[in-house]
Image (cartoon, rainbow, N blue to C red):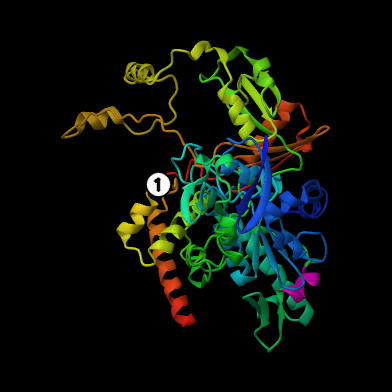
Amino acid sequence: MSTLASPLDRRGFLKLSALAGGSLFLGFYLSSARRILGADAIQAGQLPDGGYFAPDAFIRIAPDGAVTIFAARPEIGQGIKTSLPMVVAEELDVPWSSVTVVTAPIDPVFGNQSAGGSTSTPNSYLAMRRAGATARAMLVEAAARTWGVPANECYAENGTVFHRGSDQKLTYGELTAKAATLPVPGEDSVQLKDPKDFKILGTRIGGVDNPRIVVGDALFGIDQKVPGMLYAVYEKCPVAGGKVVSANLDEIKALPGVRHVFVIDGGRDYNGLMSGVAIVADSTWSAFSARRKLEVKWDAGPHANDSWDSFAAQARELGPKKGERADRDDGDVDGALAKAAKTVEADYSYRFISHVDLEPQNCTAFVQGNRAEIWAPTQNPAKGQKLVAETLGLPGENVTVHMTRSGAGSTTIP
Amino acid sequence: MAKFTLNVNGQSRTVDAAPDTPLLWVLRDHLDLVGTKYGCGIGQCGACTIHLNGTAVRSCQLPVGKLHDAKIVTIEGLSAGGSHPLQHAWCELDVPQCGYCQAGQIMTAAALLARTPQPSDDDIDTAMAGNLCRCATYLRIRAGIHRAAELAMAGKEAAK
C-alpha cells in the first residue's frame, strides 16, 4: 500500500510523537491550535506526549481508554474527516463514543494527504483497516502476555480484551503500558475483520465537526487568526502568464488602513504565484476598499487572445488526426467499427466550469525569521508546503502547513 | 475611522472602524465572531446571514455606521451552547457537508421558525431560496427545519 509508510517503524512513531507532543504543536499558536483541533482535545490532555499507546501514526490510546484518531486527509465536504477514522475505529474495535478525531499534521508518516478525484477512500481504506487491526492485535497480545495465555485464546471487543477460557478481561486503557513495549507486527500478519462483523462501518454517523459547525466555531481556513495580523488582497493578471506593467501604487498606499502595496513579478509555474499587485491593510475592508481604486496596466502576454472558441476550433482540427502519443492503445477499433451493424458518430464538448467554492480562496501565514507557518483550506497541503518553501526560498522543513476544513472543493460540488 | 457601539448577542461592543465597513467584517475582523461567513460580499449567497432586530439579513450589505442600537444576533449568539432546535436537528440529521454555508442557513431558518413555527415545504423553500449551498444539502436542510419544528413543539408540550 503506497499511501501508508508501512510497516510503520519505531522511528515513525517517535517522529510523530515529537511532532504531536513537542516541537510542532509548540510552533502552533495555541489559539489557532484550539481553533482547529478544538479546546476539548487539548484540555483532555490527549495531545501532549506522555503515557499513551501509539501503535501507528493514526492512533493514540490513553490509559483512561480515550482513543484519539488522526484524520490525515483534507475535509472538503466529502466527509473524509469522519469516514476514515470510522474505518480505523472499526478494526480497532472501540465504541465510536470513545473516539476523538484530531486533524493530523502534514507529515509523510501519514502517507498521501491530498484530496481529489474521489480517491481518498479507495486509496486509504485498506491502510486504515490495517492501522486499526495492528493496534488491536498488539492489545490482544498485551493481554495474553499479562495473563500468560496464548493470544489465540483472547479476543477484542468494544475497547476491551477478553479471555475465552476464563472471565478475565482488561480494557484497552489498562493495556496501554504493556502494549507500548511490544514489537509492531508486520501488516500482512494482521487479521482483518470479516465485513459481516462490522459495527461502525455501514451505520450512519454524523460528521465529527457538526456540533462545532452549527455554533459557528472557527474551523475553516478563512477563520484562522494570528495576533496582530494584517489582511492582504491580490489582484492577479486576468490572463494566465500576463504581467503587471504599472499600477497607481502611490495613490493606493495613501488610502486609509493600507500598510503596503507592491507589484509581484510572479513565476512561470501556472500553479504558483502569478504576476499581480498585493495590497496589505489593517483589515479586510480596508484592503477591499483599496482594491476598488487600484488601476493596473497589464501586459496580457502570450495568451491574450485565448478563448473558448479558439480552443474548440483547435480541438476540431486536432481531433481527427493521429496523436503523437497514445495513453491507451488496445483492441482493434477500426476493425470493430468496420464490422459493426450500425455506427454512430458524435462530438461531445463541455465548457469550462469554475469550482467557485463558497469559501473564497485564502490562507493565513505567520512568518518569523526563516520559518513560515500556514493555515489553508487546501486540497493538497503537502504540495502547498513545497510551493511556499520554493517561493520564499526557505528550507522545506521550516514551512509548516496546517489543514483546515475547506468551504467545499472540486470533488464535492455537483 | 469612528467609534461605534453595537448590541451584539446581548452584549454592548465598541469598535473603531470606517463607517462604510460592512457589519460582516466588523463581526469577523474586529469582534472575532467568525461564525458569520464571507461568501460573495454582494448579498447573493446568504453565507453572512445574521438577525437584525429579529429579521434575517445579509451582514455584508449593512454598513456599521447605519446600525445604531439595532439588536444584532449572530450564529454564536443564537442559543446557549448550541441548544436551538435547529442546531440539534442539524446534528441529528447530519445536514452539513462542507459546512461553510450552514451558519447562514441556520440563521435564515431560525427567523422563519420564529414567525412560522410549523412551516410547509413551500414556506421553507421560499424562505431559504436566497441561501446557496454548493454541496447542495437543500433536501437535508428542509428536513432539518421540519425536524427542528417538531423538536420545538415537543419542547413546548413538555414545558406545559
- Main secondary structure of the magenta stretch: helix
Picture residue at 46% right of the left edge, 40% below the top: B43
Residue at the (66%, 24%) spot, across then down: A255
B95 sits to left or right of A269: left
| Residue at (51, 37) in percent of width and height | B41
Where is residue A22 drawn, in percent x and y? 83, 52
Q: Compared to B138, does A180 lie above or below?
A: below
Q: In the image, what residue type sits under mark 1?
A: Gly
A326 w.r.t. A367: above or below = above
Q: Can residue A137 be seen in this view?
A: yes
* Residue B63 position (above or below residue A311): below
Spot occupied by residue A151 in the image (x, y as percentages of width and height): 70, 76
Comparing A390 with B53, the one in front is: B53
Q: In which quarter of the image is residue A185?
A: bottom right
- Please state which of residues A125 and B63 is positioned toward the viewer in this rendering: B63
User: In the image, residue B72 lies at what x, y percent?
Assistant: 56, 53
In the image, A105 versus A202, the foreground residue is: A105
**Neighbourhood count class around disc 1 (C-alpha, 10 Å): few under 14, some 14–19, many 20 upward:** some
Decide whether residue A329 is among the magenta residues: no
Relative horizontal placement of residue A127, taking residue A34 as reference (left or right): left
Identify residue for label 1: B130
Disc 1 on helix, strand or loop?
A: loop
Q: What stretch is highlighted in magenta?
A: A173-179
Percent position (x, y) of residue A287? 63, 30
Seen as rendered, the residue at the extreme front is B68
Residue B44 in the figure: left or right of residue A126: left
Q: Does the magenta stretch include residue A177?
A: yes
**As drawn, is B119 to the left or to the right of A139?**
left
Q: Residue furthest left?
A: A341
Q: Which subunit holds the residue at mark 1?
A: B
User: In which quadrant of the rendered image does the C terminus of chain A lie?
Assistant: top left
